[in-house]
Image (tube, rainbow, N blue to C red):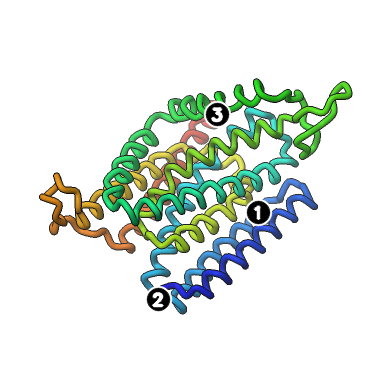
Amino acid sequence: MDVPVWFEIVSLAVLLLILIGDLLIVRWRPHIPSTKESTLWVVFYVALALGFAGLLLAVAGGQHAGEFLTGWALEYSLSIDNLFVFVLIMAQFSVPRKLQQEVLMVGIIIALVLRGVFILLGVTIIENFAPVFYLFGAFLIWTAIRQAMPEKEQEDETAAKEGFAVRLVRRLVPVSDEFDGPKLRTVVDGKRIWTPMIIVFVTIGVTDLMFAIDSIPAIFSITQNSFLVFTANIFALMGLRQLYFLLGDLLDRLRYLHYGIAIILAFIGVKLVLHAMHENSVPFINGGKPIEWAPDVPIWLSLTVIVVAMLGATGASLIASGREKRRERALAE
């Protein structure tokens, strides 16, 4: 069964209304969400994604529902990695906590636009150049190795890319030293100049671009249906702002999370290579014929690996953090 066109149109319209409503709430009522509020919003968005999977099951069958659910779990896992970088950006530019909701919302909108562009490009490339799965797979395996590097090296690499963007903006336009609420422009000594908010948005945009380059090839291993790819990304990103405030300081304790993400990326990379071998048409590989022994990894196995890797990395992080705190208390006594 194909996803009905009417269902795609209605779904995208409803999701657009939800995003607009979320943006208006942030704009009209800037505040620091409480733990209870953040929890309720995260639960709402997770329930919304699961409900959407149920609707897909009813109107398009189990295959599409399973692909969406696995794609959403994959993108949600990779999006959590965004949160670590968002924390660094907020700290680096001393963004007032009251303004962080708006910054995150703008970051999510930038991410959706960039991922939409990458999805359209990806579908076009796949339709016209099937062997691209070999390249996608190799890229994700390389990304997994880089992800497993010590956190300091990752931070240095990210900071270098963001630092270049920041230096470029400062050279091109005058920027004030202080924030003026959520405003992008302010008046200093009678001149209208940009506030540091423009630097924050540029930095988040560069970060979103980096994550889009990693995540879009990954989800194409689950499905090549552009509607499912895009909706999985929307649902993964919609609750990201609330998750940022819900986790709060807990992010500092998830020291092994990048290993879980590395395992997921490596698994997806191998899956893409196996898929490319199974559908092979490259002349110098097996004479341009499909490699029959190369299996197609089932959706249920992909979902299992994603969930186990994230839960395992999170559990190991919390256990290690708990042991460290008990050791510190024992030394203090």
Residue 160 relative to residue 17: left or right: left
Where's residue 18, x and y in %? 65, 62
Q: Distance between the residues labelled 1 and 2?
A: 33 Å
Q: Is mark 3 on a helix, strand or loop?
A: helix
Q: Can residue 318 be seen in this view?
A: no
Tell me the element at label 2.
loop
Q: Nearer the viewer, mark 1 or mark 2?
A: 2
**The quadrant where residue 303 appears:** bottom left
Residue type at numbered disc 3: Glu
Q: In terms of sequence position, does the residue under pointer 3 or pointer 1 come before the other?
A: 1
- Mark 3 and mark 1 in contact? Answer it, CB < 8 Å: no
Relative to residue 25, is residue 198 depicted above or below? above
For marks 3 and 1, give the one nearer the viewer.
3
Q: Residue 38 carries which label?
A: 1
**Residue 61: image tag:** 2
Q: Residue at (50%, 55%) from the top-left corner?
A: 233
Residue 69: name its quadrant.
Answer: bottom left
Q: From this viewpoint, which residue is outermost toward the front? A: 128
* Residue in the picture at 66% in, 29% down: 93
How far is mark 2 from mark 3, CA to CA? Answer: 43 Å
Label 1 neighbour load within 10 Å: few <14, some 14-19, many 20+: many
Residue 86, how many percent across, how many down?
Answer: 58, 38
In x, y percent, where is residue 26?
Answer: 73, 51
Q: What residue type is labelled 1?
A: Ser
Residue at image mark 3: 162
Report the label total. Answer: 3
Q: Which mark is residue 114?
A: none
Q: Residue furthest bottom?
A: 58
Q: N-terminal of the two: label 1 or label 2? A: 1
Q: Which of 83 and 314 is in front in this view?
A: 83
Label 3 CA crowd tier, 10 Å (few <14, some 14–19, many 20+):
many
